[in-house]
Amino acid sequence: MGSRRDSAHTGLRAGLDKQPRDVAAMFDRVARRYDVTNTVLSGGLDAGWRRATREALGARPGEVVLDVAAGTAVSTVELAAAGVHAIACDFSQGMLRAGAARPVPKVAGDAMALPLADASADGLVISFGLRNVADPDVALREFARVVRPGGTLVVCEFSSPTWAPFRTVYTEYLMRALPRIARAVSSNPDAYVYLAESIRAWPDQPALAARIQAAGWADVEWRDLTGGIVALHRAVRP
């Protein structure tokens, strides 16, 4: 089940210990077909999740927004549609290269040590990336460092479906169907075994809200999308 030794042996996937080098290498390998794979695996729901994230942030034109774990910058382009100065940040150089044609500024950086000055961003978004950070609590505190007082954090992440029968069906999809679909469309299908395992191991909505608050954020709230498959957590920098 996703040991670092497995990753080193196969060179294909990361483990649940989330060693940064392993995770970055895994995303480098999925970069080529990352966007199309996400659309297929989500049944086309990914575009709506991006719009909902932008709306939850509520940034005003001209504000500076950092998109952490931006990947190929699809999510950054969505944020920029609101007229904000959106910056894509990711620690996978392969992902940033795959999104090179997208017209937004890009910077390589780790969520636990962002390349921004204190209080230099009006808002920060991380979509489907906090789950992949070696220490999410360190990252949440780092987000509070770079966001100005009164600024907003939005975490868009896979979560726990709220209806028990649906949760059972979804878990079966994650562990059985998702890897099979990934084998047909992904440039690194083994990485999606890690994806399924990491989603199952991730805290539910109230537990994540508590961790965000413990990291120094205020007014933490969340909204479920698609029955709780995805949750948007929003918080304010006090």
Image (spheres, rainbow, N blue to C red):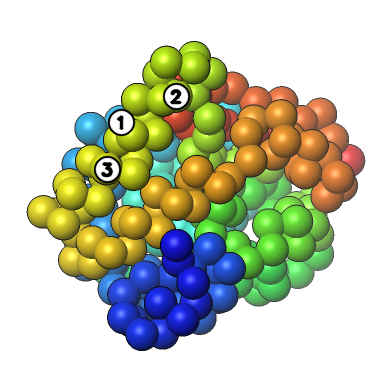
Q: Which of marks 3 and 2 is nearer the N terminus?
A: 2
Q: What element carries label 1?
A: loop
Q: Rounded to the nearest whole Å, what is the CA distance between mark 3 and mark 2? A: 14 Å
**Residue 147, visible in the rendered structure:** yes
**Which of the image's four quarters has the C terminus?**
top right
Q: In terms of depth relative to the viewer, which is nearer, 2 or 238?
A: 2
Q: In which quarter of the image is residue 59?
A: top right
Residue under label 3: 176
Above or below, 97 relative to 52: below
Q: In terms of depth relative to the viewer, which is nearer, 99 or 31?
A: 31
Residue 137: x and y in percent read: 75, 56
Q: Rounded to the nearest whole Å, what is the CA distance between mark 3 and mark 1? A: 20 Å
Q: Rounded to the nearest whole Å, what is the CA distance between mark 1 and mark 2? A: 18 Å
Question: Which three-letter amino acid code belongs to the residue tagged 3?
Answer: Arg
Count residues near mark 3 (Cα–Cα under 10 Å), then give few for <14, some for 14-19, many for 20+. few
The disc placed on residue 167 is 2
Q: Is mark 2 on a helix, strand or loop?
A: helix
Question: Which three-letter amino acid code belongs to the residue tagged 1?
Answer: Leu
Q: Nearer the viewer, mark 1 or mark 2?
A: 2
Residue 141 left/right relative to 132: right
**Residue 46, visible in the rendered structure:** no
Residue 198: x and y in percent read: 49, 52
Residue visible at 45% across and 19% down in the picture: 227
Question: Which three-letter amino acid code belongs to the residue tagged 2?
Answer: Arg
Q: Nearer the viewer, mark 3 or mark 1?
A: 3
The disc placed on residue 45 is 1
Residue 98: x and y in percent read: 27, 69
